[in-house]
Image (tube, rainbow, N blue to C red):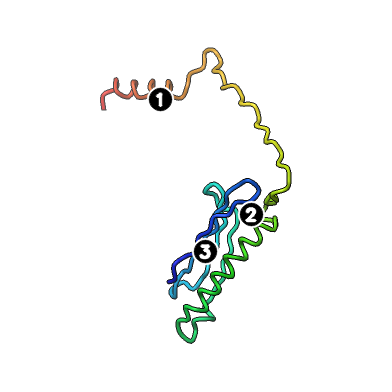
Amino acid sequence: MLSGINTDIEHGGKTYHVQTEDGGQPNPVIVTHLFAGGAILSSKRVSYADVIKSGPNPEVVREMMKEQHHGMIKSLTAGQLVGGAAVPRADEPRPTPVEPPTPPPPSMPRGRRTLDEVIDEYLASRREKPP
């Protein structure tokens, strides 16, 4: 298993992290994730089982990892779709997010009991009865 590649990218006023990992010979897959704020925005998985059929070839696998890693960075900086959402270009104005108003907490109608009250009453009645 080869060591991974990690890169932080500033784009559109936001920091993204690109991580590429090798699954090793038992799991010959190269996985690249694009993160923002700890959430995965996009992933790419490529098998290299055919590359190692004739034996380990770390140089080729390392080159495949670099290519896939740089491809993810290129997609990000080109403003292509990532994870189902368009990644903003650095020169694009960003919309101001509008948060919905917080609804007031529900009020309990008069004469109604909360679930805690019902449970307390049930447990109290069970303690009063002999087994």
The residue under label 3 is 20
Q: Hey, what amino acid is under mark 2?
A: Gly
| Image marks 1 and 2: residues in contact by CB distance under 8 Å | no
Q: Residue furthest top?
A: 110
SS at mark 1? helix
Q: Position of residue 67 (x, y in %)?
A: 59, 70
Q: Is residue 37 above or below residue 20?
A: above
**Count of numbered circles in the view:** 3
Q: Which quadrant holds the N terminus?
A: bottom left
The residue under label 2 is 83
Q: CA distance from mark 1 to mark 3?
A: 52 Å
Residue appearing at x 69%, y 58% in the figure: 78
Residue sitting nearer the eye, 96 or 109: 96
Quadrant assignment, res 129: top left
The residue under label 1 is 119
Q: CA distance from mark 3 to mark 2?
A: 16 Å
